[in-house]
Amino acid sequence: MARLRSSRAAVVFGDTEVVVDIPAAEFGAWALELSLLEEGAVVDARIAADGAAFVFSLGPPATVRFSAELHGTTFVIALPREQCAYLRSVLLRAHRDDFAPVDHVHVEGALGGRSFDLTLTFAAHAAAMPGEEASKQILGDRRD
């Protein structure tokens, strides 16, 4: 029997993108589903949200972008292992900290042979960092 996790995420489908806004209370649940998928404990991860359903699976090795099919309101996504691991790590950090490290995660893919993107947004996220502060953290304080 296929598992189906219910989510309160808001979903918006566009011509070239689907945007999923994941509530902070569900970071851990989404991370768990992707972890089970990545570890091979499930064949696919199924999440129902906002009248839509997402069926995530792992795509073939050596793929860079996800491939997707849309069947009515069911979005079937074959994620490359690297994209799955990236999404899972962002969601695990968000679950740990009670806020995401970024306001969104954008992954590129294809739907029906054309470019199509999946964007996960997070209302609870870290504050944006000014450019000067980012430079200090990346380069260190290099006063001569």
Image (cartoon, rainbow, N blue to C red):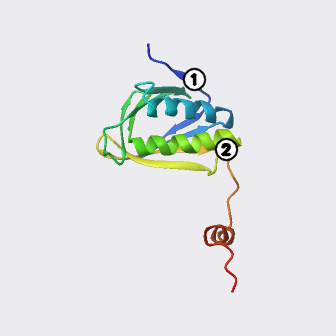
Residue 99 is drawn in which quadrant?
A: top right
Q: In which quarter of the image is the C terminus?
A: bottom right
In the foreground, 115 or 132: 132
Residue denoted by label 1: 6
| Three-letter code, disc 1 | Ser
- To which residue does mark 2 refer? 123
Residue lying furthest top: 1
Instruction: Identify the residue at horizontal 31%, vertical 38% (top origin).
Output: 60
Identify which residue, 41 or 117, lies in the foreground: 41
Q: Residue at x 53, y 48 (%)?
A: 105
Q: In which quarter of the image is the N terminus?
A: top left
Residue type (three-letter) at the residue carrying disc 2 = Ala
Horizontally, residue 49 falls left or right of residue 96, namely left
Q: Where is residue 138 in the image (x, y as percent from the top left)?
A: 61, 68
Seen at 67% across and 71% down, the residue is 136
For marks 1 and 2, give the CA distance: 19 Å
